[in-house]
Image (cartoon, helix red, strand yellow):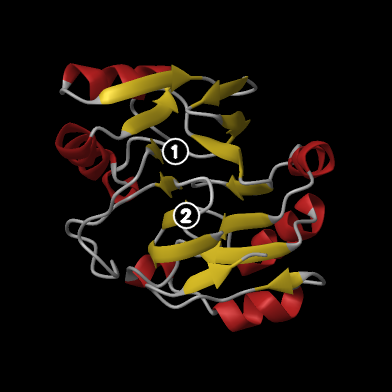
């Protein structure tokens, strides 16, 4: 399985054996850090409705390629009203979509359509946690304890999300085998040093460049 950072909060998770492609927050059009302008994905998870998390791109990709969008109930309805194939969910819900086990997590942020959220997704025997836009919250420890996260994608840019200090707290609480920082250095307001974040963490942190892949055995 491989995880590609597409830039900002966008990731593509691919498993060749199970022929599964899963995307998170695929902001591609207008993203100055995007490593590509298009993707193929079976399922697209969108954490909330802010434009830099890719709901417009997700709708376009769904309409063009049949991808299934998974999002909070209100945002999923919006996607469906705009012609996309969507599945609504909510925080605290455990469910299956296209053979993937999914759990909706809280995210402390803002949103105009439903609550912001994160996703724990089990794919090809690995468990990934995309936190969406969030600050640190105490239940992160519970998420880590229940799901034994292999890879956590955490925002570190500050201003709108955790900064590197709070993100290091979150990484420690979650206890993922690997943490990948995201949502930083796209705009001046979210400038952050991922290497400083890595140095604050006691567990493994992999700092990816836009378009770079992380391979998991």
Query: Which of the two discs, 2 and 1, labels the residue nearer the N terminus?
Result: 2
**In the rendering, at what x and y percent does residue 44 appear?**
38, 39
Residue at the spot x=65%, y=60% of the render? 167
Label 1, secondary structure: give it. Answer: loop
Q: Residues within 10 Å of mark 2 (few under 14, many from 20)?
A: many
Indicate the position of residue 158 as horizontal and vertical percent values. Answer: 51, 62
Q: Is residue 145 visible?
A: yes
Nearer mark to the viewer, of 2 and 1 = 2
- The residue that appears at 44% across and 38% down in the rendered structure is 47
What secondary structure is found at the residue carrying circle 2? strand
Q: Position of residue 37 (x, y in %)?
A: 20, 61
Instruction: Check the picture and name the quadrant holding the N terminus.
Output: bottom right
Residue topped by disc 1: 47
State the CA–CA distance, disc 2 to disc 1.
19 Å
Q: Quadrant of residue 77?
A: top left
Numbered mark located on residue 7 in the image? none
- The residue drawn where x is 27% and y is 24% is 85
Q: Which residue is mark 2?
A: 14
């Amino acid at each position: 399985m491989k995880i590609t950072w597409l830039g900002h909060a966008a990731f593509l998770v691919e498993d060749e054996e199970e022929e599964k492609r899963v995307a998170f927050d695929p902001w591609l059009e207008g993203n100055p850090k995007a490593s590509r302008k298009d993707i193929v994905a079976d399922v697209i998870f969108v954490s909330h409705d802010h434009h830099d998390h890719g709901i417009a791109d997700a709708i376009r990709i769904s309409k063009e390629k049949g991808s299934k969008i998974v999002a909070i109930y209100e945002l999923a309805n919006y996607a469906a009203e705009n012609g996309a194939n969507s599945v609504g969910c909510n925080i605290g819900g455990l469910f299956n979509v296209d053979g993937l086990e999914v759990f909706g997590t809280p995210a402390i942020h803002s949103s105009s359509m439903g609550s912001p959220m994160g996703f724990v997704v089990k794919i090809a025997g690995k468990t990934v946690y995309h936190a969406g836009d969030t600050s640190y919250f105490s239940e992160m420890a519970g998420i880590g304890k229940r799901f034994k996260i292999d890879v956590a994608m955490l925002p570190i840019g500050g201003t709108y999300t955790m900064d590197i200090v709070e993100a290091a707290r979150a990484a420690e609480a979650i206890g993922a085998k690997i943490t990948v920082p995201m949502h930083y250095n796209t705009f001046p307001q979210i400038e952050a040093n991922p290497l400083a974040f890595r140095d604050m963490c006691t567990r493994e942190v992999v700092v990816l460049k836009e378009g770079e892949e992380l391979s998991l055995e």
